[in-house]
Image: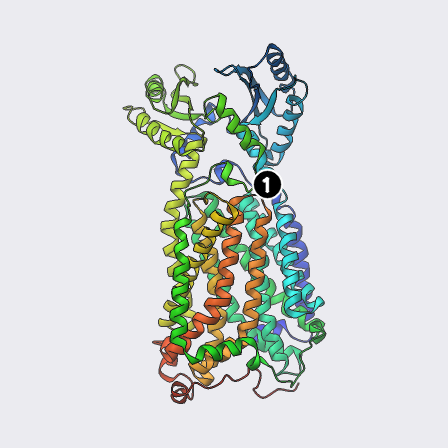
Amino acid sequence: MNRSITGWITHRWAKWVVLALSLVFLAGMGSFGSKLTSVVDNDIASWLPGDAESTKVIQKAAAFSNPDDIPAIVLYVRDGGTTPDDLAKATADVAALKGVDDVSGVVGPIPSQDGKALQVIATITLSDDGWEMLPDRVDDIAKITERGGSDGLDVRLAGPAALGADQAEAFSGIDGILLFSAVGIVFVILLITYRSLQLAFVFLFCGVGAVGIAQGVVYLLAKNLDLTVNGQSQGILSVLVLGAGVDYALLLVARYREELHNYEDRHEAMAHALHRAAPAILASGATVIIGLLCLTLAQMNSTASLGPVGAAGIACALLVMLVMLPALLVVVGRWIFWPFVPRFGAPLKSDTGIWAKVGQRIKRAPRTVWVVTTLVLVGLSFGIVQLDANGLTNEQSFTKQQPSVAAEKKLAEHFPGGAGSPVAVIAKGDHAEAVAEALSGVKGIDPASVAVKSPAGSPVAYVEGTLTSAPDSAAAFSTIDRARDAVHAVDGADALLGGNTAVNKDVQEASGADNRLIIPVILVVVLLILGLLLRSIAAPLILLVTVVVSFAAAVGISALVFRHVFGFEGADSSFPLFAFVFLVALGIDYNIFLMTRVREESLKHGTRKGALIGLAATGGVITSAGFVLAGTFTALATLPIVFLAELGFVVAVGVLLDTIIVRSVLVTALNLDIGRHIWWPSALWKTDGPGHLADEAHPADPVAPGSEPVHKA
C-alpha cells in the first residue's frame, strides 16, 4: 500500500476522521444489511441454468399454470384398508382446506388402487414472500388434517409444498445461526491465540462489522441491479466474510505487533506494518475476488450469483481490515495487546518459536521432506473415488430425517411415484394429441395420467403426465431422457419437456459442465496473480501444484469421512466446484502470506535463509488464520443441509492441511531445496540477495524478524 495512504490512515489526527467515517459507514450499510432477507430469492428460477429445457418450460407454462402454485398432498393411509369414516374425514378436510389462506384449489379425495390410501391435493399460491410463508401455510393445512379421524388412520403431508416447507425451515435464520456459531468459534480461537480478551473483541467487532457492510452492499446490488441472492449464497456470505476478514486482520496485526518492537511511535509502526502487509493482503483478497467472479461463467444461476455476492463480501472485508482496523488500533494504543504488550526495543523470539524449530528440522533434508509429504498427500487424494458427486435425492439432501421425505416414501407405496410432481410438456397447439400419445408410450410414465391441459384450439399445447417412480430417483431421470426423446421426435411439435424431475436432471448436467469449464479458468487466474505478485514463473507454478495436491487430499479425506463416518450417501453435483473455488482461492492465501515475506527476506538474506525467516515470522499468524477460517466454515455444519455440511467440512480440512502441512512443511522444503531458482526468471533468481553464494553453500540459521535497528519517535 502506498506510504502516503498508510500515513493518512494512521496519522495522529486523521485517524479520528478515518475511524469516525468508518463507523458511520458501518452503521449506514448495516441498516441496509438488516433488509437482506427481504430480497432473498429462493424461487426455482434463482437456482436453475437459464437456458435449460426445464427452465424454458417453466417460462412458457406460465400461461397454463401459475408458476407460484405449489401442491401440498395430504395422504391418508390405513393398512387394513380405508373405511367410510376415513373417506368422510378426508371429504370434510377438503371443505375446510378451501378456507385456508393462499390455498387456491383443492382436489380429492382420490382413492388408491390398493384401497389402503386416499390423497387430497391442496394447491398453495405463493405470494412475493412465498418461501418464508410456506411453512406457515403447511402448518395451517396440518392443523386441519391431523385433527379428528379414527384410530389407525395415518395422516401425512407430502408433495412439493411439504418439501419446500422443510427446506425453508432448514434455511430459516441462516444468517443469525451461522453468524452466531461462527463468532463463537472465532472468539475461542482468538482468545487461545492472543490470550487478550480486548483484542479478541476488536477482531470480532471488525469481523462482524465487515459482515454487516457486506450484507448492506449485497442488499443494494440486489435491490437496484437485480443481483440474485438465494438462501445458499446468503449463508455462505456471512461465513466467508467473517473468516476471510479475520484472516486479513490477523496478518496485519501480527505485522503491527512486530513493528511495535521497532518503532516507539505506534503511528509509525502501523504505517510501516500497513506498507509491508497490505500488498499480500490485497493480493490474497484479489485472488479470492477474481476466483469468485469466475463463477459468473456458470450455467447454474445459483452458482453464477454466488460469484458477485462473495466478491462484494471480500471487498468489504478488505476495506474494513485495511482502513477501519488500523485506525482503531492506533487510537486505542499498545494496551490492546495486554497482558502481552509489545515493548519498544524488546527483541522478538520468532527464532526460538515452534515454526523456527520446524524450519531447522526441514533444513536437514528438504528434498526428502517435500517428496515424502507430496506422496502422503497424493495417497490421501485416492479417497476421491469414494465421492459420489452425482446429485442427492430429497432424502439424502438433509442431515436428519424430514417429515416430508418420509411422507413422500409412504405416498409412493400407494400412488404413482411422481404424484404431485408431474412431467410437463410444452408444444405447438396443433400437435397436442400427438405429443400426448408419444408421452403415453414412454416406459416410466403412467399412461392413464397423461392429459392435455391446454384449451382446445390454443396455439400452445400443455401436456402433463405422472412418473411411475419416485421423482428424485435414478429411474425417474432415465424416464426423463426417454420422454424427451419421444416428444422431440414428434415432427413439427417443437416440444420441450420439464417438471421437477427434469429440473433436477438439468441441474446435475449443468453443474457438471460448470465444473469442467470454471475449474481450469480459476487455475489460470490464480497462476497469473501469483506471477504478478512474486514476479516469477517457477514459484507460481510450484505453489499452484501444491494447492491442487492439497485440494485433492482434502476432498479424498472428506469423501471417506462423508461415507464412513457421517453416513452421507453422496454429494451435490456442484460440490466439487464450490470446494475447489474456496480451497484454491482461500488456500493460496496462505502461500501468498508466506511467499511475499520470503521474497522480502530473500532480498536481504538470500532465498534459503529468507525461507527460514519467513516461516518463523509468519508461522504463528498463518496457523491462527487457518484455524479461524476452518472454524468459521465448520459453522456450516449447524444447518441440516448435507451440501453445506459437506462444504464446511471439506473447506475446514483443506485449510488446516494448507496451513499446517502444505505451507509450513511442503512449501518451505521446496524453497530450501530449490533455493534461488524458485524466483526464475526474475532478477532475484540471478542475485538472490547480497550474499546468496554463501547462502547456497551453507544455509544459515534464521535471523529473527525485528532484530533490525529500532526507531525512536
Q: Position of residue 400 (x, y in %)?
A: 57, 40
* Number of other residues with Cα within 10 Å of mark 1, as a class: few under 14, some 14 to 19, many 20 or more: some
Up/down of 205 relative to 605, above or below:
above
Query: Which amino acid does the dot numbered 1 rest on?
Result: Ala
Res. 128 image quadrant:
top right
Please, which colouring scheme is shown? Answer: rainbow
Res. 278 image quadrant:
bottom right
The residue at the point 40 percent across, 57 percent down is 381
Q: Decide if residue 66 is on the left or right side of residue 26.
A: left
* Label 1: which secondary element: helix
Q: Nearer the viewer, residue 332 or 458?
A: 332
Up/down of 407 relative to 91, above or below:
below
Up/down of 705 relative to 106, above or below:
below
For the image, the number of numbered tags is: 1
Q: Which residue is mark 1?
A: 170
Confirm whether residue 217 shows in the render. no
Q: Position of residue 491 (x, y in %)?
A: 27, 24
Confirm whether residue 77 shows in the render. yes
Q: Decide if residue 704 is on the left or right side of residue 368.
A: right
Quarter that holds the C terminus: bottom right
Q: Nearer the viewer, residue 175 or 275?
A: 175
